[in-house]
Image (cartoon, rainbow, N blue to C red):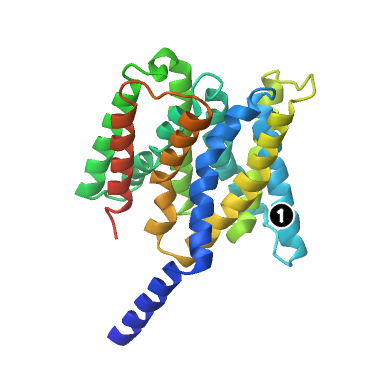
Amino acid sequence: MTSVAQTLRKRRAALALSTPVLLALLAVYLIWGSTYFAIRIGLESLPPLLMGGIRFSSAGAIMLIVLRLRGARMPTWREWRWGLVFGVLIPGIGNGAVTVAEQTVSSSTAALMIATVPLWASIWGSLRGTRPTAREWIGVVLGFIGIVFLNVGSEISANPLGFVLLLVSAMSWAYGSVWKRDVRTAPGLVAVGAEMLCAGLFLTLAGLLHGEQITHVPSVESVLALLYLLFVGALIGYSAYSYLLRTVSPSLATSYAYVNPVIAVLIGLGLGGESLGRFGLPAMLCIIGGVVLILTGRK
């Protein structure tokens, strides 16, 4: 038994250093970290909810068509139901609220708020019966201290609606992720495609009910940003993340949670001329430190 365990550990260690794993990690780190700035560019001439609707419905449809052509089984009616539930909770509200919030809040600040998803996931998990470790609780406290710093003397305090939307986004994404662990969804990328398609239809309907319209030709920059979010952010990013979940440890796969905010802040500050305010750096250190403690607090 010991020799088998040692063999498995050696194989896992070798896999962790393989080129596909490194490329997948690099893709998730850079792609998901850059989507916040891409959303800001897209909002220059596209309404937020319809932009999200076009992004996710197109990405979901493309992914399901490709998978079907490759012989994958399509979701059953029961799996479609769960696709709708988690599509609304995770990419729907989780990403849609971010897109709306970025009309008044910078992309770097939005990224830091969304970095608190593991904090909320730990809290939701405790309410569903998973008792957090002491290290995880310390991470939660440290993360919320970061949120306080983020609200002191920054744009968040001047945009309470943006703060609420980002808070709802993080809580919805976290709750959907925790709930999804206990549900049997469609296999692999089929579930991801179904969720993105349902999220896109949900956001499109919400945008139309809210009165959003595309009354003029979007700018070239906004169209390019939308295409980037669709093909790179959704299709490539989700595919890379799904590969990581299947091949490496959960702690390594979810390490994007404390890398993405740094990437997003650097892009926002460097390309967008954004600012985090006086307490932006302490807030980032507290939030990322809390996320690291949570993601490494349970074997």
In the drawing, does residue 230 fall left or right of residue 24? right
Residue 20 in percent (x, y) is at: 53, 65
Q: Nearer the viewer, residue 269 or 208?
A: 269
Quarter of the image with the C terminus in it? bottom left
Residue 126 in percent (x, y) is at: 31, 45
Residue 151 in percent (x, y) is at: 34, 21
Q: How many marks?
A: 1
Residue appearing at x 29%, y 42% in the figure: 289
Which element type, helix, strand or loop, lies under badge 1?
Answer: helix
Mark 1: few/some/many CA within 10 Å (<14, 14-19, 20+): many
In the drawing, does residue 25 fall left or right of residue 237? left
Label 1 sits on what residue type? Leu
Quarter of the image with the N terminus in it? bottom left
Residue appearing at x 45%, y 54% in the figure: 182
Residue extending farthest to the front is 270
The vertical placement of 289 against 219, above or below, is below
* Residue 261 shows in this picture: yes
The vertical placement of 125 against 92, above or below, is below
* Residue 168 shows in this picture: no
Residue extending farthest to the top is 158
Residue appearing at x 70%, y 20% in the figure: 212
The vertical placement of 7 against 91, above or below, is below
Residue extending farthest to the left is 134
Residue 64 in percent (x, y) is at: 71, 54
In the drawing, does residue 250 fall left or right of residue 3? right
Residue at numbered disc 1: 64
In the drawing, does residue 41 fall left or right of residue 151? right
Residue appearing at x 70%, y 40% in the figure: 227
